[in-house]
Amino acid sequence: MKKIHKYNFKAKLIIGFIYKDEAIFIKAKEKLKNKFGRIDFESAEIDFHYTDYYEAEMGKQLKRKFVSFSKLIPIENLYRLKLYTNRLEMKFLNAKARQINIDPGYVDLAKLVLATTKDYAHRIFLRKGIFAEVTLSFKNNSFSANEWTYPDYRSSEYIDIFNQIRKLYIS
């Protein structure tokens, strides 16, 4: 069991995907594997029905998956990861519309942090138009939602996934 210090500034990279076409997901996942190394967790495919935010651009009957990578990342690079995934999304445009949404973040001992381009009162500016949000907090042996947490991230299905990923982080 590796020792993780309370103030370790490396964390477990996670990527959330929203997509319709599994072939696009597979291509995007392969590009991320080439950049970040071995994937040590991949969730089952989940129906994405929590919001219609992406439907105008990507269509209906969207799917969601999460992956995590075995190599830990320096947390100060989160903004770079989001800039990279934004560029990667652009490689899969269809008539100027995204076919996949790729959201990076990280899991550490205390939280799940997501990167975003959208500012809000509870988000912290990192660099180059990228913000960070503590989406879930780890309390009482499980992740739990914050007041601002998206509805899908509040679900027991997602929380179970992130608890599994956290166990990989500490093992």
Image: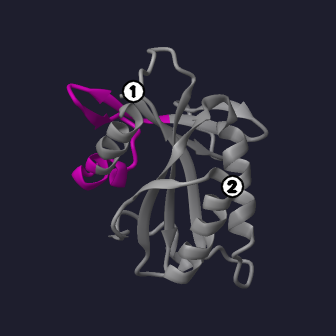
| Foreground: disc 1 or disc 2 | 2
The disc, 1 or 2, on the residue closer to the chain's N-terminal end is 2
Placement of 59 over or under 78, stated as above or below: below
Query: Observer-nearest residue: 94 or 15?
Result: 15
Label 1, residues with CA under 10 Å away: few <14, some 14-19, many ≥20: some
Q: Give percent across and percent down for residue 29.
A: 57, 66
Q: Give percent across and percent down for residue 1.
A: 35, 28
Label annotation for residue 35? 2
The count of marks equals 2
Label annotation for residue 109? 1
Q: Is residue 21 visible?
A: no
Three-letter code, disc 1: Leu
Placement of 168 over or under 59, stated as above or below: above
Q: CA distance from mark 1 to mark 2?
A: 24 Å
Placement of 72 over or under 151, stated as above or below: above
For mark 1, give the secondary structure. loop
- Residue stretch rendered in magenta on the structure: 134-160
Mark 1 and mark 2 in contact? Answer it, CB < 8 Å. Answer: no
Q: Is residue 117 left or right of residue 152?
A: right
Furthest residue to the front?
Answer: 1
Placement of 93 over or under 117, stated as above or below: below
Residue at 36% x, 61% y is 43
Q: Is residue 166 visible?
A: yes
Furthest residue to the right?
Answer: 128
Label 2, residues with CA under 10 Å away: few <14, some 14-19, many ≥20: few
Q: Give percent across and percent down for residue 9.
A: 57, 23
Residue at 71% x, 64% y is 88
Residue at 57% x, 64% y is 101
Q: Quadrant of the C terminus?
A: top left
Three-letter code, disc 2: Lys
